[in-house]
Image (cartoon, rainbow, N blue to C red):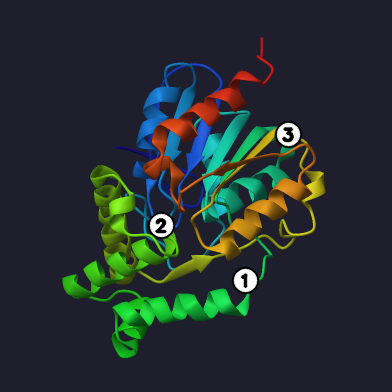
Amino acid sequence: MAMISTDETRLSYEEAGDGPPVVFVHAGIADLRMWNHQFAELSRTHRVVRYDWRGHGGSADHEGPIPHHQDLLALLDALDIEEATLVGASFGGAYAVDAALAAPDRVNALALVCPGMSGHEWPEVFVRESRKMLLSAVPHERLVGYQEGNADPDPADVAAMAQSQAGFMVLGPGRSPEDLSPEAWDLTLLMLRESFARRWSSPANEHLWPQRPAKGRLHEIDVPTLVVKGSSELPQIQEVADLYARGIPGARLLEMPETGHLPSVERPGELTAALAELLSELPQRS
């Protein structure tokens, strides 16, 4: 794993291949390993980069708000990438869109996988069920302490939270771990355990969204866009994918049946094929 410095931080990243650049932005419940299949396969034809957000994975700690979309653009600068296709999942998709809106000349295509959106307000039922899920894993008093950061979390609490989050977010309603391959389930739990252990033991941080969020600005995006949603994940998250598909001119929606929140892990070959198709349709730079 390599480290690279930007003006604000140090980011952990991996790079492989030659050709037009493709940058992968992971989900908040994962790290750069969620792109294992796509990174390996697309490196045959493209220069591929994947990295850990600031405060996550192998990247540097940070206390307080983090402008993740600015970190993404700073990574492009540090790697001398003038223009790239951005592939983002969950909140990573939101960061990719915010980067494209902030610097449209730096982005030639977008692939948004079960994406979030800056400025989007989650329905009360989603907030309520999310809170219920958290408290089913860790009692309120300990959870508050963990969320304040710099804690020494009980490994049993870390494991319980990873299991609960995997069921709620990754699988979706009415599904069980048996619906994923053993390899996909094991990687999901590993990333989640390491994510919560890191998050709770490090300085507390949060998203710093742009002053002009993506909500209400999707019509400004004029690059080829693929939107992917899993038909088995939470309906409130599927609705965000639909907002992108309707709001970005010419966006193409790919619905993956019997798939949850991490298609790159659950159905890696299918997602890689969809990304390869998107990339094959882009104009080749001379």
Whether 286 is drawn above or below 261: the answer is above
The residues tagged by marks 1 and 2 sit, at their Cα atoms, a distance apart of 18 Å
Q: Amino acid at mark 3?
A: Val
From the image, state whether disc 3 or disc 2 is nearer to you. 2
Q: State the residue position of label 1.
A: 122
At numbered mark 3, what does the secondary structure look like: helix, strand or loop?
Answer: loop
Q: Amino acid at mark 1?
A: Trp
**Which class describes the residues within 10 Å of circle 3: few (<14), some (14-19), or many (20+)?**
some
Q: Residue at x 77, y 49 (%)?
A: 247
Whether 53 is drawn above or below 105: the answer is below
At numbered mark 1, what does the secondary structure look like: helix, strand or loop?
Answer: loop
Q: State the residue position of label 3.
A: 223
Spot the residue most to the left: 155
Q: How many badges with numbers are in the image?
A: 3
Foreground residue among 155 and 79? 155
Q: Relative to residue 261, is residue 178 drawn left or right?
A: left
Q: State the residue position of label 2.
A: 170
Foreground residue among 202 and 228? 228
Q: Residue at x 77, y 36 (%)?
A: 250
Q: Residue at x 24, y 50 (%)?
A: 186
Residue 170 visible to the viewer = yes
Precedes in sequence: disc 1 or disc 2: 1
Q: Residue at x 71, y 60 (%)?
A: 213
Whether 93 is drawn above or below 267: the answer is below
At numbered mark 2, what does the secondary structure look like: helix, strand or loop?
Answer: helix
Q: Amino acid at mark 2?
A: Val
